[in-house]
Amino acid sequence: MDRAFHALGDGTRREIISMLARSGAQSANQLRAPFNVAQPTISKHLKVLETAGLVRREVAGRVHLFHLETAPLQQAEDWIASHRSFWEGTLRRLDQFVGAMDPEDGTS
Amino acid sequence: MDRAFHALGDGTRREIISMLARSGAQSANQLRAPFNVAQPTISKHLKVLETAGLVRREVAGRVHLFHLETAPLQQAEDWIASHRSFWEGTLRRLDQFVGAMDPEDGTS
DNA sequence: TTATTATATAGCCATATGGCTATACATTAT
DNA sequence: ATAATGTATAGCCATATGGCTATATAATAA
């Protein structure tokens, strides 16, 4: 989980994920195109994404194709959703409780 | 967004968020209790969470109370959800297309 | 006023990060 | 066989990170 969130904490890597989501599997060079960075820089980013399980590497000759992997995205999303919604549920329940209280003495 | 994902990329900070979601606003000392770390260490973590907007600090005398802020959690969740679901939608559409093809010549 | 408590800041350390250049490796093209 | 292409690795740099201890600051208690 650490690795997934860390990988998402960089704009270049999030943009790579966007590209894969929009247009499907692409090579390292294709993914590098929109960024003004050296080739080894993208290579590093792709390794970070791969290690986090967010992409899968398919070696096709001298080209490496990268596929988006949704499982860890789903996990990260679930972690956030559960905490956020639990907390919002707590607020909602507290609000209902306060709303049921007697405005004079604070008892229900 | 960078800051939010980065803040979530650390187990201690995620656990702090869990504590706040479970039990509501708590002081720095309360949040420190479950971890075997020095006081300034938690102070740093809390500042990271605060800078990312994930918590709000309420100074009450010498005690600092930390409240969970769900807006950036929602943003992060939405980012992931949109990319994941877009991609899964793409897969689903591709699957329907392939399913409609003639198995002999690959045409539809 | 003095002591105690809660938190922050300064400053250090080891390690990780994101970027680069130069170079190596692997595969395809000539 | 040689050249060209796609990617990775090594090694460097500046900066950031998470941890610590020691100390400062702020607020409450004695």
Image (cartoon, coloured by chain):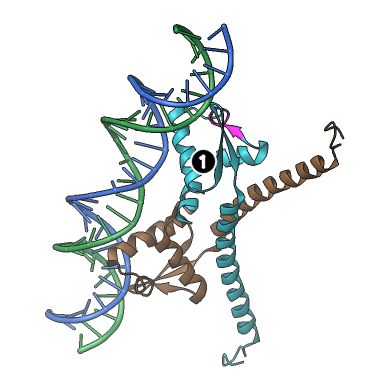
Chain colours: A brown, B cyan, C green, D blue
- Residue C23 x %, y %: 15, 62
Which residue: 28% across, 63% down? A40
Query: Residue B30 lies in magenta, yes or no?
Result: yes
Query: Pointer 1 indicates a residue of which chain?
Result: B
What range of the chain is rendered magenta?
B26-33
Looking at the rendered structure, the secondary structure element under dot 1 is helix
In this view, B94 is above or below A72: below
Q: Is residue A23 above or below residue A91?
A: below
What kind of secondary structure does the magenta stretch mostly adopt? helix
Which is nearer the eye, B14 or B49?
A: B49
Mark yes or no: residue B38 visible: no
Q: Residue at 40%, 63% (x, y): give it.
A: A12
Report which residue position mark 1 lands on. Answer: B13
Q: How many badges with numbers are in the image? A: 1
Q: Is residue C18 left or right of residue D4?
A: right
At a point 38% along the width and 59% down the height, the residue shown is: A47
The percent coordinates of residue A34 (x first, y second) are: 36, 73
Please tell me which residue lies in front, C11 or A38: C11
Answer whether residue A73 is magenta in the image. no
Q: Quadrant of residue B14?
A: top right
Q: Position of residue B83 (x, y in %)?
A: 55, 67
Image location of residue C27, percent across then percent down? 30, 75
Quick check: can you spot residue B3?
yes
- Crowding at label 1, few (<14), some or many (≥20) Cα neighbours within 10 Å? some
> Identity of the amino acid at label 1?
Arg
In the rendered view, does B29 fall on the left or right side of A102? left
